[in-house]
Amino acid sequence: MNMYVSNLSFHTTDADLKNLFMEFGEVSSAKVITDKESGRSRGFGFVEMSDETAAKNAMQALQGKEIEGRSLGVSVARQREERSGNSYSGNRGGGGGGYKKW
């Protein structure tokens, strides 16, 4: 089960997040999401646990728990949706060399 963890301290590391959830069972992965440019935490992350019962217990126990002065939010992660909009795929236009003779 993949879980979304919000309202993390900006000092929380992947290891911190993993250790927090390990109390409830085996953690397959734990990742704090960081800003691509600055490398600073964005205040949320994802934890994956293979045992669904352990994951549900962790969600129940950690939802609202105060860590470093912040009240955690823990929920089932939604499937990531494909982004649309400013995609540069498809017809890019162009061609023709830029000058037209009349």
Image (cartoon, helix red, strand yellow):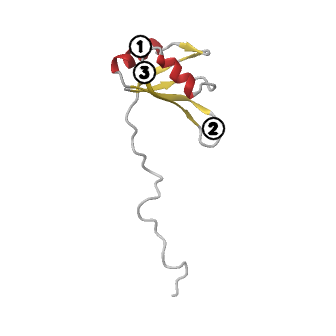
Whole-percent x, y for residue 89 in the image: 43, 59
Residue 7 in view:
no
Asked which quadrant contains residue 58, the reply is: top left
Judged from the image, the secondary structure of the residue bearing numbered disc 2 is loop
Q: Residue furthest right?
A: 38
Report how far apart the C-alphas of labels 1 and 2 lie in the structure. 30 Å
Judged from the image, the secondary structure of the residue bearing numbered disc 1 is helix
Q: Amino acid at mark 3?
A: Glu
Q: Amino acid at mark 1?
A: Gln
Residue tagged 2? 39
Q: How many marks?
A: 3
Is residue 92 positioned above or below 46 on the image?
below
For residue 60, which numbered disc appears in the image?
Answer: 1
For residue 37, which numbered disc appears in the image?
Answer: none
Task: Identify which residue, 43 or 28, lies in the foreground.
Answer: 28
Whole-percent x, y for residue 82 in the image: 40, 45
Report how far apart the C-alphas of labels 3 and 2 lie in the structure. 27 Å
Whole-percent x, y for residue 5 in the image: 48, 24
What's the residue at 42%, 21% (across, down)? Answer: 26
Q: Specify whether 17 is left or right of 68.
A: left
**Of the residues under marks 3 and 2, which one precedes in the sequence?**
3
Asked which quadrant contains residue 55, the reply is: top left
Residue tagged 3? 26
3 or 2: mark nearer the eye: 3
Report how far apart the C-alphas of labels 3 and 1 lie in the structure. 16 Å
Q: Amino acid at mark 2?
A: Gly
